[in-house]
Structure formats: C-alpha cells, structure tokens
Image: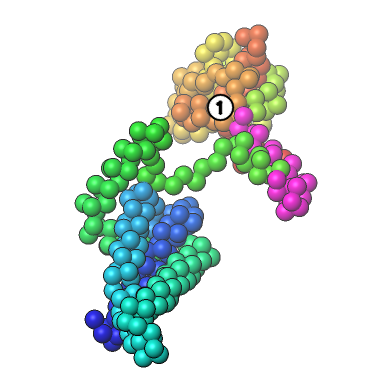
Amino acid sequence: MNLSVGVPLTLALLLGNGFFVAAEFALVAAKRPRLEKLAAEGSRSAASAVAGIRELSLMLAGAQLGITMCSLGLGLVSEPVIAETITPWFHSAGLPEAGAHAVAFVLALALVTFLHMVVGEMAPKSWAIARPERSVMLLAPPFRGFTKVVRPVLASLNAITNLLLRSIGVPPRDSLSVSRTPEQLRDLVVESRRLGLIEESDVKVLKAALDAPVAPLAELVTPVNEIVDVPPSAGPQEVIDTAVRTGRTRIMLRGGGARARMVHVRDAYLARARGRTTPAGELAHPVPTLSVDTPVADAVATLRESHSHLGMVRGTDGNIAGLISLDDLLTTLLAPA
C-alpha cells in the first residue's frame, strides 16, 4: 500500500477512533435529566441520547468494539505504510536492510502511537467531558446507527460479560443511575462547606431539605381544638358559611370517631345550586388516619394514594392528636425553612 492511500486511511481510522472515544465519554458524563427535558421539548438528538443512556452497557460495548477495530486498523495499515516509506531513508544513510527496517518500524510505531493517543483518545475525551450534553446530542444518532448494525455481535459480547460479572457476584447494570442517597448528599453538603463552596446559611437550608422527608409529622399537626368542623347533619348552606368564615375549602365532620371524614365546599355549592338540602354526612369523603411518628414523605404518599388532601393524626396513646394537610406536607418537602 502506497503513502497516498495509507495517509487518508490513517486519518480516517484516527477520526473513527476519536468518534467512538468521544461517544463513550459523552454518554457517561451527560446529565440525563437535562437530556430528558430537551427530548420532551421535541429534540430528536436528545431523545436518541436518552435512548443510548438507557441501554448504556450495550452502547459502551459498541464504543469498545469500534475503538478496537480502529486500533487494529492502525496497527495493520498505518504502521507498515509509514515504516515502508521511511525505510529507504535509513538504508541510503548506510544502515543495512534489516537495521533500516527495524529503525523505521520503531519510529512508525512511535508516531502512530502518539497520534492514536492525542488525536484518537485524549482530544476527543477532553472535548466530550467539557461539553457532555452537546457532544452526546451530536454523536448519539450516528453512534446508535452503528450499534444497530452490530447489535447481534454486541448482544453476544454483553451476555458473556454479564455472565462473568454474575459469576463473581457483581450485578450487571444496563443504565447509569443518577440517584444519590440522603446520606451521600449530606456528606456532599458537609464537604462543600469545608471547602468553602457554600455558606453556612446554605448548609442549614440543604440539611433541612434532606431531613424533611424523614422528619415525623408532630410539628405539622393542627391541634384538635383548631380543627374546623361541622356536624354530619349540617346542610349545604352551613358548610358554605363555615368555609367562608374560616377560609377552608375542606371541612371535617364532627364526631367521626375512628372513621374520619371531610366535606368539600365545592360539593356543598353543587348541592345548593341543585336545590338540595343534602346533609354534610352524605357529601363527606373518608380521610386516612396516620400515626404521629409517620415520616413526612410517607404521609405524602399515603394521602396521594387515598386521593385526600387531609389526614387525621393519632398520637402514641391512640387518641386523635390533630389534622394534617397535604399542602403543609408539600411545603415542608419543597420549601424547608
């Protein structure tokens, strides 16, 4: 192979190697939530990138296959072409044929290795890490096209890899997790404060946000004597008057006992508009009962599952301790003081 063919082929192999390296690092470094937002806004390249991250193990296998193919190509094509081109130089300088070829081979190997590391590895890696979302959106569509073509080979290689991992007790992962435990986030907050990256006031806010989901309901409970209620026999107008006077749209039924219920002022308005005198007891909906030591996050989940904005809270003695509202719980989770 002459130099006019070998040089363009070498450049193509270097660019191909760089493409696979950049795609690999971009997939790992890109922030999935940002890409999902762009995909939801209609970006096809972002949607392709998200699809790649969802099957990360397979995509990384595709990148490794591409890098290996390009590296082998450089070894099979580029080094011999360069060595054959410069061997006559050393032979004409007085070196014997074997010596000239050995020196030329070493120099060709050093040159190809240098170009492979700088052009094919380090430069694309740095570019992908510096702009992960932009680079993954640019590279994901053609890269996924490549993996689609070689998918049967990748699936076989990936299955063998997963089998080896399971044999040593390591569960394989097909996607990159972006979640962090509260303990990890607390450590990050403390370390960020130690390094002077955040202020002490920010530390308090962040710790409050992390503690809120596991904090008990005790401090958020409206005491029994402050609960706004009406008797089960109250007519629609009495419910409406109570709502107007107190500013509450959801009003508890008095004397519910173990079966707590509430009536929405909307239902009272509908009943009045239809000329009905339906008592509050017939308009009421059940309210879930929670323990006073229930964590805030669990309480939010319970109220949402019950489709209720209110919940009765029982103390450790089993008696009703008060009322909790979904608005108060969400405020605690989303805007801690």
Looking at the rendered structure, the kind of residue marked 1 is: Ala
In-front residue for pair 82/74: 82
In this figure, what is the number of numbered marks?
Answer: 1
Residue displayed at 30% across by 46% down: 158
Q: In the image, 330: left or right of 155?
A: right
Residue displayed at 37% across by 75% down: 102
Instruction: Quadrant for residue 262, please give it.
Output: top right
The verdict on residue 195 being magenta is yes
* Chain part drawn in magenta: 191-214
Residue furthest out toward the top: 317
Q: Assign the C terminus to one quadrant of the image.
A: top right
In-front residue for pair 154/115: 115
Residue displayed at 55% across by 41% down: 180
What scheme was used to colour the molecule? rainbow
Instruction: Report the predominant secondary structure element of the magenta stretch.
Output: helix
Residue carrying label 1: 299
Residue displayed at 45% across by 60% down: 26
Question: In the rendering, at what x and y percent does residue 124 appear?
Answer: 46, 68
- The reply to whether residue 56 is visible in this rendering is yes
Please determine whether, in this image, residue 89 is positioned above or below residue 48. below
Instruction: Quadrant for residue 314, please give it.
Output: top right
The verdict on residue 281 being magenta is no
- The reply to whether residue 43 is visible in this rendering is no
In-front residue for pair 84/95: 95
Residue furthest out toward the bottom: 92
Please determine whether, in this image, residue 267 is positioned above or below residue 252. below
* Mark 1: few/some/many CA within 10 Å (<14, 14-19, 20+): many
Question: In the rendering, at what x and y percent does residue 95 appear?
Answer: 38, 84
Question: In the rendering, at what x and y percent does residue 301 appear?
Answer: 51, 30
Please determine whether, in this image, residue 232 is positioned above or below residue 141. above
Q: Assign the N terminus to one quadrant of the image.
A: bottom left
Q: In the image, 305: left or right of 214?
A: left
